[in-house]
Every structure is written in C-alpha cells, then in structure tokens.
Image (cartoon, grey):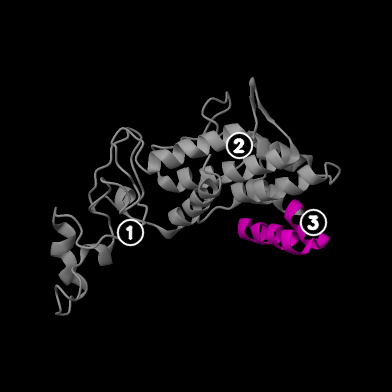
Amino acid sequence: MDELVWGAAWLYRATKLKKYWDFALNNLNETLSPKGVNDTRKYALDYGWDAKQGGIVILLSQFVMKDFNSGSPFVSTLVDILVCSKLPDSPTKSVTFTPENLQFTTSSSLLLLIYGQYLQNFKRQVHCGYLVADASKFIQVAKGQADYILGKNPLGMSFMIGYGDQFPQRIHHRASSLPSIKVHPKLIKCKDGSPFYLTKNPNQNILTGALPGGPVNSDNFSDDRGNVQESEPMTYLNSFFVGVLAYFTGHPN
C-alpha cells in the first residue's frame, strides 16, 4: 500500500487532481500502521527501497503547509514525529544515524534537507519538546552526516569508493573484484570467481562513487567483501546521497 500512496502523492503534486490527494489521505493510516495501531508513536516512518512511509509524509507536508485548512492535521503531526525522531538532541529522538547502515543515513539526511527547505519557504519551526528547530538545524544535521560519509569520522575513511585518500578496498561486488578482460582474457565461469572473492587483496577495479553498507555502531568497518552487510554497495544508497550532495553543491555556504 505504501507504494500506491507514494505514487498518489506524486501524481497529486504533478496534476493537483483532488482524487489523488483523497486517495493518499484515505489510505495513509493503513499505510503507516497496517495493524490498525492508533498511537502515532508506533507508526512506521522509514524511507528506503522497500518502505516509502517517511517520504510520503514529507511530500504531503508541503501541501499542508500551503493550506492549513486542507483537513490534514494528521500529516502535520506525523511529519513532526518523524523529523523530531531524527534530530540528535531532540528529547524524542529514536533513530540512530551514522554509524549505522548507510541506507538510513542517506535517506534520513535527504528527508531532513527537503523538510528544512519547506520550513524555510513557509517560515516555520518545529517543536520537539524543549527543542525548537528551524531549517538551519535540519541542514546542519544533514551536513554532519554527509561529512561523516566522506571521511570526517573516527576512521578517517571515506565510505564513497574512489573519494579521498582512504576508502573501502574490498567491497562485495563481482565486477569490482574480478580482473578485467584485458588482464584475464579467458572466460571466468560462475564459480571460478571464488579465488578473487576469498582473497584478502584489494579489489582489482575501483567502483568509483559506490557506497557500501557502511560501519557498525562502534564506528568499526571490517573492509571485508565477505561481510555483505557492511561491504555491499547498493544503488539506492547513491540515489539518496545524490540528492544530499546536489543540495550542498548548490548551497556551498
């Protein structure tokens, strides 16, 4: 259902047809809480390749900000719960940023940046208990996460492959770890790649720009292609991070 509501929200943004707005709102509760939980603290507000709930409430929130009489106070409540759960010094913080799987780091950073722009455009603030946060707070948190990914972390390692002097050398990626056809012109059958997978040597090809799963909660990173959770690059990590980097490229100060 989350994909259908996600699609309806985008179709409303593009067409402004009320039927898409109605579909999104009418199915929002089921999307966020399939078991019918009414306590908003228990709603699923993730945003990733298989969960669009966080993206949905952020996207819908801009329309609520434009028209507070749209009959959607529920959206405002949800989006405040979402963003307050992601601010490090919020009393209602419940989300771990880095060190954590970079999917949640990159996606959360993108959502905070987008919502920060909404706040800026509509001159709003968010009240997270005793913490009052404006657009600059959201931008600051996202910038800190981007800096962490690109090397400002206890390891001094950039987690973007090919960026900086130190980056992961043994990512879990077949084409990156196998030799090129110029170096090894003979056919490499499916299971013939095992020696290249098992070696402790760095990958033979640099997958420039890729982001792997990233470090564990202790800031450690094994740089071991056998540790799939940490070392496997995923396109959806880059898709979120492209948005984050695009923002800071356009707003360098």
Please identify the residue farthest to the bottom as the structure is shown.
186
The residue that label 2 is drawn on is: 83
| Rendered location of residue 125, percent (x, y) | 70, 31
Work out how far the residue at label 1 is from the one at label 3, CA to CA, in angstroms. 43 Å
Q: Nearer the viewer, residue 247 or 145?
A: 247
Say what secondary structure mark 1 lies in.
Answer: loop
N-term-proximal mark, 1 vs 3: 3
Q: Is residue 192 above or below residue 132?
A: below
Q: Specify whether residue 203 is in view.
A: yes
- Left or right placement of residue 125 versus residue 16 in this view: left
Work out how far the residue at label 2 is from the one at label 1, CA to CA, in angstroms. 32 Å
Amino acid type, callout 1: Thr
User: Magenta span has 21?
Assistant: yes
Say what secondary structure mark 3 lies in.
Answer: helix
The residue that label 3 is drawn on is: 22
| Rendered location of residue 143, percent (x, y) | 49, 38
Please identify the residue farthest to the front as the structure is shown.
253
